Image (spheres, rainbow, N blue to C red):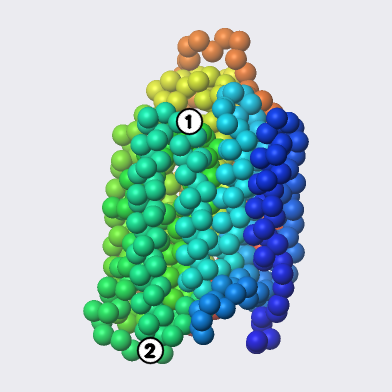
Amino acid sequence: MNDLNYVSHIPLFVVLVSMAAVPLILASSRKPNLRETWTLLAAGTKFLLVFSLLPGALEGRSAVLHLLEISPGVDLALKADPFGVFFALISSSLWIFTSFYSIGYVRGNNEHKQTRYFASFAMCLSATMGIAFSANLLTFIIFYEMLTISTYPLVIHKETSESISGGRQYLLYTLTAGLFLIAAAAWTYQLTGTMDFKAGGLFAGTSFPGSTMTVLFFLFLAGVGVKAAIMPLHSWLPTAMVAPTPVSALLHAVAVVKSGVFGVIRVVGFVFGPEVMAAYGLNIILAIFAGTTILVASLIAFRQDNLKRRLAYSTIGHLSYIVLGAALLSPSGFTGGMLHIATHATMKITLFFCAGAIYVNLHRENISQLNGIGKIMPWTMGAFAIGSLGLAGVPPVNGFVSKWFLALGALEADHLVVLGIYVLSGLLNAGYFFPIVHRAFFREGEHLEGHREASALMVVPLVITAMLSVLIGVCPDLFFHFYELASLIAQSLTGGLL
């Protein structure tokens, strides 16, 4: 074991803590306050454990733990490297806010099967932490599939025909993607004799026919591209918006789709590596898919009157910001892409929290019904305005910071077309978000008498996540050192390639 790795059980505890909360949550089904206490304790404990790994990650060190050797070179192992800690910090911190928000949502909306809801949420976070801390492709696949299965009860939570249909489509897409990922991992092991993630790529220094590498890359892209919602693998995501709003926030900001783009960067930077990606032109293939997704998803968003569906197509576009940043293979491109995982998370979870508060408070789901609501829900719509500004790339919200590095990455790689895509997408973001804010604050609404803000359990989390979006925009290293971590990871991946 090299000097940058040290043995630690903390990654395992991070995975297990919310898993251990599941039976406690199920046993407390008739005591809602106790049930939700277990949820909050698990969320807080998980975050503190992840946060304890941050100092080592900032030094470039990784906490490792080998769980089970299946055969030589094939084992189940956890490794909290800087990139894994980066992702785990985002997910574990936002789960705390989502947990408080969920309590207000399910009570305010009188949701059924609340115990199943909270238990499934806990399992999702265990799986997400496992993805973050996977040391190799085998471990990654196991937790990736665990995330799929544990999310399904949340997607079908309402148990309507529409939600059941959406859940089936979700499983069809994600389980099929898992098969592609298994095939890609097996082929990788056959070619290299290892499945361990390695900064700079485990294919670095190897030479295989171009056709082999291209087909293998497409297998990986099909495997991780579904959860990353890269077009044409995206249609499950808008359909899954039939789920309760906190679930939508989980899908878009904390777990599922972020696990997808996390997987894309793992494949690009830790499996193939920048040198191999460039040598075989694989980054160009990835850039074409990502650039197309950004523009097409933004245009489709204009046509959506349903607020959550518009947010869904916005997410599809912004996920490909991250993918396109990785495809640039430049230090700033990787830095901007990783930063956008964090910045998009705080902004998009804010917007979904706002959508849920509007639904619980006013039972309105369509943008055309939102006239004047800013007057009765100023905190909610003020937070929505902050998130909208950030996604359009307006400073000082944190979206500006990640977009700045993505643009810089395009210039470093001498890809002016990519720079144009980022600029045009920012304008399109303003075009489909700003009219919502204008409706809320500058148009007269109907049937708003007697209404005011939603419960504090919902409003306080969305205000905090909006404030975090601004604070991290002003100081990207505030609290979690996201910029420092992203820069460190980008340097380890590129090694001065460009």
Q: Quadrant of residue 366?
A: top left
Which residue is depicted at the point 67% across and 65% down? 12
> Is 81 rendered above or below residue 206?
above
Q: Nearer the viewer, residue 7 or 213?
A: 7
249 shown above or below 55: above
Where residue 90 sits: x, y (%)? 61, 55
State how far apart marks 2 and 1 are (Cα).
Answer: 50 Å
Q: Quadrant of residue 120?
A: top right
Q: Is residue 68 left or right of residue 274?
A: right
Bin the neighbour count of mark 1 within 10 Å (Cα to Cα): few under 14, some 14-19, many 20 and up. some
In the image, which disc is placed on residue 206? 2
In the rendered image, which residue does mark 1 sit on? Answer: 158
Q: Secondary structure at mark 2?
A: loop
Q: Earlier in the sequence, mark 2 or mark 1?
A: 1
Q: Nearer the viewer, residue 337 or 135?
A: 135
Q: Residue 114: x and y, percent?
A: 60, 32
Residue 293 located left or right of residue 253: left
Please give the name of the residue rendered at 70% of the width and 62% of the height, measured from the top-left corner.
13
Spot occupied by residue 203 in the image (x, y as percentages of width and height): 41, 83
Q: Nearer the viewer, residue 372 or 34?
A: 34
At x 40%, y 35%, the residue is 164
